Amino acid sequence: MIKRLITSAVLGAAILGSQACLAADYTLKFGHLANEQHIWNQAALKFKELVEENSEGQIEVQVYPNEQLGAEMDVINSIQLGTADMTITGESLQNWAPKAAMMAVPYAFRDSEHLRQAVEGDIGDQIEAQITERANLVPLAWFERGPRELTSNRPITSPEDLDGLRLRVPNVPLFVDTWEALGARPTPMAFSEVFTALQQSTIQAQENPLSLIESASFDEVQDYVNLTGHVRSWIYVVIGRNQLEAMPDDLQQVVRDAAQEMQAYEADLFAADQKRLRQSLEERGMEFVEVDTEAFAEKARPAVLEALNDEQRALYDAIQDL
């Protein structure tokens, strides 16, 4: 009887001990807008795996895709309030940090390599420092976004081909001004209305990354993808500064190291997905058209510069000098 009691006590202690080991010291709620299949969510799950493994269970990462914690701005506000911890966000950060506006300026970047040089150099350091200082968010990693391309039912190779083209744009003043300067007739419109407007010829063209061109089935109402690449941008994976600094230094390093591995992992997924998207759209009948991007950039530049404040213009000039 005594032996049985001792055995039970040992087993009970072992179970309690294992439960204590399983309980994380820190929990990071990571909410974002992409769906479960999106490469951003795949990257977030990779981050979760790395952090939990390398912290030996001291940190638990809970990933919430599909705006489960709210829209982008809602999650940012929740992080600042301490009810969420991480998200994926882009130019919305300019609401706090004006330098973050550079994350979506037309024709600021020539190509992906030019973008990478800016983000990983002094320019990126300046933007990240302002985000941390003014939004209390720490950028841990960055992902390149697919460039915005122009779709139409006639090939567009130079700004002259845009003359009078009725073009849907998001309700972003800089985008409207840029396309007006290029000679088009930009029309702000909700994304949900674009397919029907193209179908009914209310508008003749639209511009978006390949991922949205595919998912919205614009191939059914547009014949050409004109490779304008007019907006090359990136987004950050951010964590609340208070949440990061609440962890001991060794666990902060685990989080930062995992974020860098996540960044490399997502970059590989992104490159493969861009190739897949082009192939998919070509198979659906869309023709890809090479564009004189230098002519577009030159004609757009006055409208872009006029929209920037002195601080942003200094960054823009520094980007052009890279």
Image: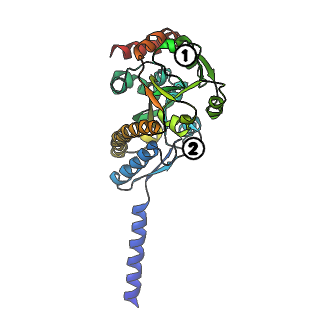
The numbered mark at residue 179 is: 1
Residue 305 horizontal/vertical position (percent): 49, 10
Residue in the image at 35% along x and 44% along y? 258
Q: Residue 3 or 263: which is nearer the viewer?
A: 263
Q: What element carries label 2?
A: loop
Q: Residue 188 or 265: which is nearer the viewer?
A: 188
Q: Tell me which amino acid carries mark 1.
A: Trp
Quarter placement of the N terminus? bottom left
Check the image and tell me how it is coloured.
rainbow
Residue 279 appears in the picture as rendered? yes
Q: Residue 174 or 200: which is nearer the viewer?
A: 200
The vertical placement of 16 against 76, above or below, is below
Residue in the image at 44% along x and 36% along y? 282
Give the residue at mark 2.
67
Kindly indicate whether the residue at mark 2 contacts the one at mark 1 (C-beta within 8 angstroms): no
Q: Is residue 163 toward the left or the right of residue 238 in the image?
A: right
